[in-house]
Image: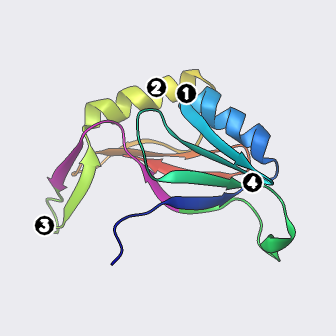
Amino acid sequence: MLTGVGSVSILVNDARKSAEWYRDKLSFEIVGIEGHAVFVRPKGSSYPLLHLCGRCDDWGEDRPGGRTGIWLNCGEIIIRKKRDSGIVLPASNPEEVERTFHELKKKGVEFSEDLTTTNWGKFAILKDLDGNEFEIS
């Protein structure tokens, strides 16, 4: 039986340089280095790990960049309901999302979508050094 997600691979051009960016900009911790890969995670969490996969033959034609579909939450997760459709969504407290957005902007993190308010909360899309995009909400 599956019991969780151990790590998620993110293609990056230089794993060590990217790990430093995740540490310095997002306050992640570096938890391991293995060959072309560096593993990072948010401070204080156990899983999942982001496997920053540096350029290697296993990539084939793949390249870094674009939407990852990965959601980075900002503190405690709350369940919110979209007013228009009634769909239930997990999200972080909107005030925490806004605070995190402004903190990351001050650190020089680039956003492909600025802070947006919806009927279920707030979100923004940040970009790492290689153009990989993550949602904060």
Dominant SS in magenta:
strand
Picture colour scheme: rainbow
- How far apart in space, not on screen, are marks 2 and 4 (Cα)? 25 Å
The amino acid beneath tag 3 is Gly
Q: Point out the stretch of residues depicted in magenta.
A: 69-80
Residue 73 lies left or right of residue 91; in this view the side is right
* The quadrant where residue 63 appears: bottom right
Give the mark nearer the N terminus: 2 vs 4. 4
- The residue that mark 3 highlights is 86
**Position of residue 44 measured from the top left corner of the image (x, y, whole percent):** 41, 33
Q: Residues within 10 Å of mark 4 (few under 14, many from 20)?
A: many
- Upstream in sequence: badge 4 or badge 1: 4
Q: Residue at x 56, y 21 (%)?
A: 106
Q: On the picture, is 7 further left or further right than 39? A: left
Q: Secondary structure at mark 2?
A: helix
Q: Report which residue position mark 4 lands on.
A: 12
Q: CA distance from mark 3 to mark 1?
A: 32 Å
**Chain-order first, disc 3 or disc 1:** 3
Question: Distance from label 4 to label 1 (Cα)?
Answer: 22 Å
